[in-house]
Image (spheres, rainbow, N blue to C red):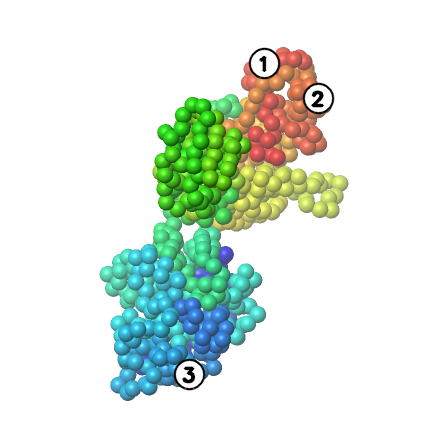
Amino acid sequence: MTFDQVIVLDWSAAGTPKLGKDSIWIGHATAAGVTAENIATRRRAETRLATLIDAALSVNHRLLLAADFAFGAPKGFTQTLTGQPNALALWDWLATRITDTDKNATNYRTIAAEMNAQFAGHGPFWGNGQKYETPGLPRTKPAHPLGLAEHRTAEQVGHEGGLRPKTLWQLAGAGAVGAQSLTGIPMLHRLRARHADKTAIWPLEPTEAAAVVIAEAYLSLLGDEVRAATAQGMIQDEAQTRLHAQAFLTLAKNGNLAVLMAPDHPAETLLAEGWYLGAGQAATVRAGLHTLTPPRLRNDCFAMPQGVAWTQVDDALDRLRATLHPVTQIEATPLAAALGRVLAADVTAQRANPPHANSAVDGYGFAHAATGAGVCQLPLAQGRAAAGQPFAGAVPHGQAVRVLTGAILPQGVDTVVLEEDCAISPTAIAFDGPLKPRANTRSKGEDLPQGAPALAKGHKLRAPDLALLAATGTTTVQTYRRLRVGVLSTGDEIVSRNAQPHEIYDANRPMLLALAAGWGFDAIDLGHACDAPAAIRNHLNHGAKTADVILTSGGASAGDEDHVSRLLAAEGHLSSWRIAMKPGRPLALAVWQGTPVLGLPGNPVAALTCALIFARPTLFALAGAGWQTPQRFPLPAAFSKSKKAGRREYLRARLNADGHAEVFASEGSGRISGLSWATGLVELPDGAAEISPGTAVQYLPYSGFGLN
């Protein structure tokens, strides 16, 4: 879930207007940075929030407003008070009763007493900090609260994480937070009503289509960071709003806010009680302040040694492999969103798989030591063991128990006999022995013990990998952010539609975008630039801001119209590599404003060949997935060719009915139909070669390049 702006609200207004500590603070994070405002009254703060919301909507920005007070009450309270379980019913109830003046005078204590009166005996609210008495609102905590929990589920989860949230029921005293909810909920209710068609309350309403999402925050999550800021002289409330706004916006941009907004709790609980962002996930919120950015590539990373004119394919690949490193940030990714992501850290099994010794079959379990050769007859113990329904207690030695596939082996059982191999009565079983010890069982951790390596850093996650990680208790993994690959076409002769006789349709851009997307990267269409330095410069500037790496096609050589190379050389850092290969001799490798640029040939056949041989391993290395070597294997040739020495050649090829490699009828680099006809490439060596039918050649299938 992404947002363009984040507002974090600290609603701790004093009884009389004041600024500084224990007053209202609004932290506001945008692409331009983080600001904080201090406001003395709730009325003025509401007006300011309305202005900020209107401003965001006017520029089509999506806004997250996170407020530091509870949006609901422990389960059962709203149902008793309103007759409805959803926390929004409490919002409606309070909105018609709570009043607030421009001097922070409010009737929330009277309304709290009114709510207390709805419960038999005494109500849950307590803490009257005023000199005068409010009938029905005790000054101290009741000795025996009613059948309502002290804390919502979210606060209980926070307690487990080491935090000490206060209870909604406390309205006065050190750390009291209840008054903030009673005065804050009606205010948010009014803000929501101003743009009812564009605003949603999380998690009480669907938020996917909302331009403004109002959520609950808990501003003690970043305790260490806030303490560091206050040590430098910043007021605590200001530090809390600034830091949380910054963290939430960063998490929204890198995709990790979705982790906070998908709590693993029943919808019934969330709708009744609400939830706060980061409950039980303080580390994820903290990561929003400590995003790691790998170093950019050096400007001279692609420079060839002096005096090198032609570069052999293997030398070029070796040089790239030694130079490149990941350029994307590391982030925590929930397993459900991790398909296709590249692991940035090794993953170990959090739990053994299987977690317990269990039965591999339906049958009967017993201690192997109680059996022997010949016919074995064992009395049956009462009960059974099934998957998810363990046997209670231990099975006496010399007895058997009914066990089903996947059931945890009960204490006293180490061997299982198949049901089909038994004679069975209501009280006993008989079978022919001997059985092997531990027959038909799976030992604990036989697939993967707890703490054992599961997957290594650099691994690109596939569906089977998600199964392995889920089975071993992993719910979140450290991954590299998806590599953003920008694709730019250049050339006056290139058009996307309505081509004139002197123009050609842009075949490279859709091909390269499809390659990048198929490899699991975020493909960014940078459009087409004409042969003018200003136009190319603008497109490269945009690409440097939006992409991690840029692929261009055309203009990569040194001819009169090779404007890309000239611009990269004049204003960037360019190395033009002359690769000893056919097709695709020119390859421009450059750095533009810190972003690597791969200039591919303009001819589609050469562009695809260079993309497969050079761009693919380069992109995977930049993405953190390590160096990718294409699959290749020898096959008999189904063609004849006399090859000269000097350049490695790649021929469009496919397998015939005999499993031999046949090649496209023409080697012309303009024959795009051959790319579609082929299912792979035949790679001929750098040296001279005489190929005739039956000669072994190296076949590189498209599937080995990730083209499926």
Which quadrant holds residue 49? bottom left
Which numbered disc covers residue 657?
A: 2
Q: Secondary structure at mark 1?
A: loop
Which quadrant holds residue 180? bottom left
Identify which amino acid the numbered label 3 is placed on: Thr
Residue at horizontal 49 percent and vertical 40 percent from the top: 426
Identify which amino acid the numbered label 1 is placed on: Ala
Q: Which dot, 3 or 1, sits closer to the camera?
A: 3
- The image position of residue 494, as x and y in percent, is 66, 42
Which numbered disc covers residue 237?
A: none
**Marks 3 & 2, CB-CB < 8 Å contact:** no
Q: CA distance from mark 1 to mark 2?
A: 28 Å
Residue at numbered disc 3 = 99
- Which comes sooner in the sequence, label 1 or label 2? 2
**Badge 3 local density, few (<14 within 10 Å), some, or many (20+)?**
some
Identify which amino acid the numbered label 2 is placed on: Ala
**Badge 2 local density, few (<14 within 10 Å), some, or many (20+)?**
few
Residue at horizontal 40 percent and vertical 28 percent from the top: 371
Q: Secondary structure at mark 2?
A: loop
Residue at horizontal 61 percent and vertical 41 percent from the top: 514
Q: Is residue 675 visible?
A: yes
Which numbered disc covers residue 688?
A: 1
Is the residue 313 above or below the residue 562 in the image? above
Residue at horizontal 55 percent and vertical 36 percent from the top: 599
